[in-house]
Image (cartoon, grey):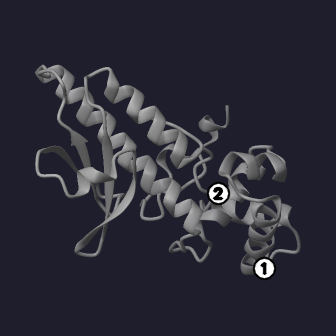
Amino acid sequence: MIAPDIESLVELFAGALEEHGIDGHFCLARSGEQLVPAAGDMASLINATDVLTVEVEASALPGALVLLARPNRPLSREAWARVRGYAELFAARVLALQELADDVDTECGLTLRERYVLGRRLAGLAPIDIAEEAKLTVNAVSEAMDKAAAKLGADNVGEAIALAARRGWLAVTNLENCSSSSQNFTYKLTQNG
């Protein structure tokens, strides 16, 4: 389940759920011991008692709970497995998009945005294309590249890209598997298209 922004992702997930007679969803992200609203098309599910839930616990994610409206028809075992899979993909993508938007620090000293922007530059995208893809301004993209170069002690962005690539610090070049808590947060040549 890939979408460039949360709004598109919510629509995409809603369409997938509609096929199974489910007319609403909402994702709650784990923040410490609490669950906080993340994204969805039916916030009223947060306080509802008659909902389906999908708990998302993965080592690369802080955790999430996806709330689903009750389907208007019975779901087969296979259909429920498909819905559950969609929900897990939706939650993972929501969390990744939120981390990128929040510009989360990562263990290597660069932020998620800096790693992502450098990875996309290496893939050949111009700053304006990266900005459009990540729903950032061109200034935010340029600032991320400049900050990364300064943190790495590089003389220019090209040198910063080379240093980060050699150290395995570039984020995956699409946001599908992007997470600041991932153990293997490396540039993947096969995803450059």
- Residue 141: % across, % down: 77, 62
Q: Amino acid under label 1?
A: Ala
User: For the residue carrying disc 2, how many other residues have a C-alpha within 10 Å: few (<14), some (14-19), or many (20+)?
Assistant: many
Horizontal placement of 105 versus 153: left or right? left
Q: Amino acid under label 2?
A: Tyr
Is any atom of residue 167 visible in this view? Answer: no
In the foreground, 111 or 23? 23
Indicate whether 85 appears above or below 98: above
- Residue 91: % across, % down: 36, 48
CA gap between label 2 and label 1 equals 16 Å
Which residue does the numbered mark 2 point to in the structure image? 116
Q: Secondary structure at mark 1?
A: helix
- Residue 102: % across, % down: 56, 68
Residue at position x 42%, y 64% from top? 181
Residue 77 figure quarter: top left
- Residue 139: % across, % down: 82, 65
Residue at position x 56%, y 54% from top? 186
* 2 vs 1, front mark: 2
In the drawing, what numbered circle is on residue 113? none
User: For the residue carrying disc 1, how many other residues have a C-alpha within 10 Å: few (<14), some (14-19), or many (20+)?
Assistant: some
In the drawing, what numbered circle is on residue 150? 1
Where the N terminus falls, by quadrant? top left
Horizontal placement of 74 versus 14: left or right? left
Q: Secondary structure at mark 2?
A: helix
Residue 15 figure quarter: top left
